[in-house]
Amino acid sequence: MTLRSRAGTLAIAGGALYVCSAPCALAWDKDGHEAIGMTAMSALELNATAEVKHLMGGRDAVDIAAWAHKVNKKHPWTIGLHFQAQSGLKCKGGAELSCPDNKCLVKALKYFYGRLIHKDLVSISWPEGMKLTDDADCVKYLINLIGDLHQPMHLGLAADEMGRNLTVMFRGKKSSLYDFWDRELTQLTIQGSPGFWWGGWTHVKRSHVEYHRDGENWKRDGVVSFDKWAEESAKYLCDNVYTNPISGRKLEEGLVNGVFRIDENLYELWQREMLSKMLVAGARVAIVLNAVLHNRDAGQALHSGSAIQDLEDEPDSMTPQVAHLGRQGDSAHAQDKLACRGSYEPWNLRDSRADLPPGHAHVAGQRCGDQGEQSQAPGRRKRYVTLGTL
């Protein structure tokens, strides 16, 4: 279920103050954030994996994928940290991104990263009475916000409320352009190809070229990478969302009675891009978390716990969670890890082996990378094999 703020909530994003007449969707839906978390866990170094699980009381990047949106519900002013709107009336990419009072997506990423490495990179004034002092909270925010950075509508035009005021229709169902990217693409993929979605595609090996390139770039550029990733998303938005990449026409030019109709070709193109962006987002989460540990001074341990308490449906973060058999380091995983090597060819949603995406060999009756624990939802598994165990 996508977490949304209540109707009427005031939200600030990129300098635009707007009132959500309907519940405000926030970034990829829970399934999308979980996919990003799975990819991130597959790319974390072993010491980073252990550190993340320690911070989260036995949980991981998948379990807390939507944590920041629960914070939004309790503290609505934090909604602005998930967005960085373009201030102009026409989409111009990164050149038009604005951030008043540093309460926006890129500045928030630099703030939380700086907190973790004990460097004052950005100053953000927190409201009186709200504390954010624990390393675990900063890590949770990084995981969530890096995912948000790759949902292109989070860098949309303030003039149309980042696509909320643009109506689209696909297969007879209307939604806003924002909601289509936020939720509909994910849910349509799950409904149409459940075997693919739950079949272990969320592994960094599927974006290994980008992962290694981005890792080298981070070593050179550091937090400037956040700006570059934002510019990348904003440019994609202008060239491939606000502009129909198939026809080359602006979406507004294709409106019929105020509605833009999405055809199957455009849907499939956007769907592939969504999956790619989730993989890249997860890989970049891992790059940043790995860098946190590399850039801390010796002896500076990360502190578990949370300064933000009483979130809806949030278990006590101080209560240790015991990982189920089959997560990191169990004997079956160690025996099967070599079989998980091999070709990670691009996915094909129309592959006849719908329950087994290309590039995933059976291992002792399981899918490669499917040694994960059962999640709360029936039939869903966390599936990741860390690079450190390959």
Image: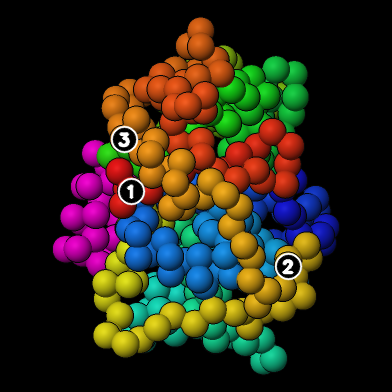
Residue denoted by label 1: 389
Residue drawn at 58 percent across, 83 percent down = 132
**Separation of disc 1 and disc 2 at Cα?**
30 Å
Q: In this view, does 125 lie above or below 266?
A: below
Any part of residue 162 in sight: no
Q: Is mark 3 on a helix, strand or loop?
A: helix
* Discs 3, 1 touching: Cβ within 8 Å: no
As for residue 214 lying within the magenta part, the answer is: yes
Q: Is residue 309 left or right of residue 291?
A: right
Tell me which numbered mark, 2 or 3, is placed earlier along the sequence: 2
Q: Is mark 1 on a helix, strand or loop?
A: helix
Tell me which numbered mark, 3 or 1, is placed earlier along the sequence: 3
Residue sitting nearer the eye, 177 or 334: 334
Residue denoted by label 3: 338
Residue denoted by label 2: 315
Residue drawn at 59 percent across, 79 percent down = 305
Please rate how many residues cluster around mark 3, counting C-alpha atoms within 10 Å: few if below 14, some from 14 to 19, many from 20.
few
Give the colouring mode of the picture. Answer: rainbow
Q: In this view, does 332 lie to the left or right of 7?
A: left
Tell me which numbered mark, 1 or 2, is placed earlier along the sequence: 2
